[in-house]
Amino acid sequence: MTRASALRGLCAVTAAWTLLAADARASTTPVDALRTVAVQDGGRVKPLDTFARESARRITGGRAFGAESVRGLDPVEWVVAMMADPERWKDAPIVRVSHSGLRAAVSLSATRDRYSFRELATHEPLLEAAEAARAKEESGSETPLDPVEREVADLYGNLVLMSELFTGEAHSVHFGPDGSIWATDSVDHTVRKFSPTGQLLLTLGKQKVAGDNTSQDAFNRPNAVAFGPNGNVFVSDGYANQRVVEFTPEGMMTVRASALAAREPSGPTDMPVEQLLPRASR
């Protein structure tokens, strides 16, 4: 199986994950069939099994490879279950907050290191600290984030990853009219173009750098792409920003189209402006 066909398989299989998760404990066969499906993450194409294990270690604070089970589920089963029953998993205390300085800085308990997504995503001191860290990074300051600020940014990034697993929006894959593979990574703030054989051809955005609605070279959690009749590429920069950005096939920005509908920010679970893509790409 080529990487292209595997990525197409992931798009098709995602719609069936809800059904698979319902029987994840009873039979490992459906989940095993997903382990080798290729996904794009951080500029690499990797098996879903690898992505799931890395995500489980990142969120739960696991250390050793091979010990990434989450509440009795292996990592792929856990990803399936997160997508199938997000409300249940939003209340599961699986997020490890081990840094005592971080807990003190955002008014979390000094004696507790496990929290649920919902607890953290609605905890105002954490959200305020995450916004301050983001603003510092984007200000161009020569002073790097201090250790606590870095822990805050990493924890918020984990919440963003969980939000994308809940909604099924993590690492969206689209296919160009020429057969190319376009992968959006909203955690990494990039859109990457691959050849049908998996060779990286083009990167839009800056890795791990979030831009605002006026940025010429950076996104803030892009989530989808579409293609115009002239070959131009339209990127929905719509989880944190509110715009659709147009590029030439070579990756040069041509037009920025801001989203029309205003919305109130609501933390890591904001809805994207992907619905603007069909109109913008005409």
Image (cartoon, grey):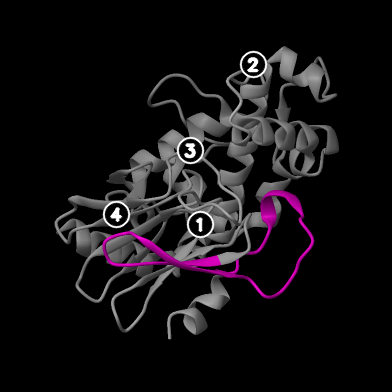
The residue at which mark 3 appears reads as 208
Does residue 33 appear to the left or right of 278 in the view shown? left
Tell me the tag on residue 222: 1
Figure quadrant of the C terminus: bottom left
The residue at which mark 2 appears reads as 146
> Where's residue 131, x and y in %?
72, 38
Front residue of 72 and 94: 94
Q: Secondary structure at mark 3?
A: loop
* Residue type for callout 4: Val
Magenta span has 262? yes
Front residue of 195 and 256: 256
Query: Separation of disc 4 and disc 3 at Cα?
Result: 25 Å
**Mark found first going from the N terminus, 2 or 3:** 2
Compared with residue 14, is residue 151 higher up or lower down, i.e. above or below?
above
* Residue type for callout 1: Pro
- Where residue 70 sits, quadrant-wise, is top right
Q: Secondary structure at mark 2?
A: loop
The residue at which mark 4 appears reads as 37
> Where's residue 67, x and y in %?
44, 25
Q: Are marks 1 and 3 in contact (CB under 8 Å)?
A: no
Tell me the tag on residue 46: none
Query: Separation of disc 2 and disc 1 at Cα?
Result: 27 Å
* Residue type for callout 3: Lys
Query: Separation of disc 1 and disc 3 at Cα?
Result: 12 Å
Compared with residue 57, is residue 221 higher up or lower down, i.e. above or below?
below
Q: Are marks 2 and 3 in contact (CB under 8 Å)?
A: no
Q: Are marks 4 and 1 in contact (CB under 8 Å)?
A: no
**Mark found first going from the N terminus, 1 or 3:** 3
* Residue type for callout 2: Asp
Q: Secondary structure at mark 1?
A: loop
Magenta residues, as a range?
244-273
Figure quadrant of the N terminus: bottom left
